[in-house]
Amino acid sequence: MGRTAIYAGTFDPLTVGHVSIVRRGLRIFDEVVIAVAQNIRKSPLFSVAERIAFIEDVFAQDLGVRAVAFDGLLVDLATDLGAAALLRGLRNGADFEYEAPMVHMNRHLAPDVETVFVCGEQNEVFVSSSLVKEVARFGGDISPFVPPQVLQPLLDRIAERS
Ligand code: COA
């Protein structure tokens, strides 16, 4: 049986930074399951189904990537899917500070599930979904920061909401 990792997040929307983490994860794991959290706290611009559709489109040619919706504890999803690891991306030290408590809490909850960090590309360390949305709202060029499949739908959604 192959090794599965789960890469969880809100992905509102998927950015090039997320894509890098998934592709690097695929060098280590046979399968990367992208777990899309509803995350009402963040008032997402796209529904979970829309976010999953972007992911399926962007990774259509990447064997071993699939997306699922999830709500609840991440380690429960990991156990349900028989995943060996939680895949996380590190952009900088602040990410590590934010991630460290989650590593230990998740380890407490599911000792057999490892958290594995990979670093994305150097030129993507400042990319986040919120920043991309904010720049787009004010008419800035976000084309380098989101996959081409995401760009126009994102601009359209922002225009609808403003
Ligand atoms: N490239 C680009 N952006 C990145 C990135 C990367 N490599 N890594 C992180 N980011 C961005 C994300 O897009 C997100 O941006 P946003 O705040 O603008 O939306 C931000 O950095 C934080 O990312 P992340 O830590 O992945 O948070 P998230 O809010 O997208 O997802 C969950 C958080 C869902 C993974 C987490 O809350 C969770 O596991 N919840 C399940 C409940 C649970 O098990 N809780 C106990 C945990 S111990």
Image (spheres, rainbow, N blue to C red):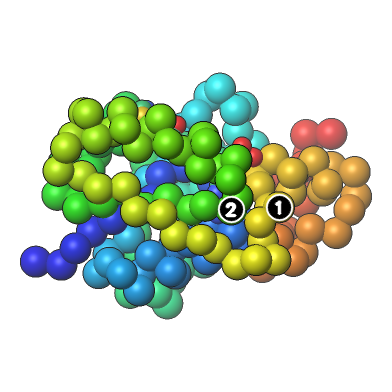
Residue at the spot of label 1: 126
In the image, residue 40 sits, relative to residue 117, either above or below, namely above
Q: Is mark 1 within 8 Å of ligand 1?
A: no
Seen from this angle, which residue lies furthest right? 139
Q: Position of residue 41 (x, y in %)?
A: 56, 22
Q: Position of residue 21 (x, y in %)?
A: 48, 61
Seen from this angle, which residue lies furthest left? 1
Looking at the rendering, which quadrant does residue 112 occupy? top left
Q: Is mark 2 within 8 Å of ligand 1?
A: yes
Q: Position of residue 19 (x, y in %)?
A: 52, 63
Residue type pointed to by label 2 = Arg
Looking at the rendering, which quadrant does residue 5 occupy? bottom left
- The front one of 13 and 104 is 104
- The CA span between labels 1 and 2 is 8 Å
Task: Tell me, yes or no, if residue 160 can be seen here.
Answer: yes
Task: Determine the secondary structure under disc 1.
Answer: loop
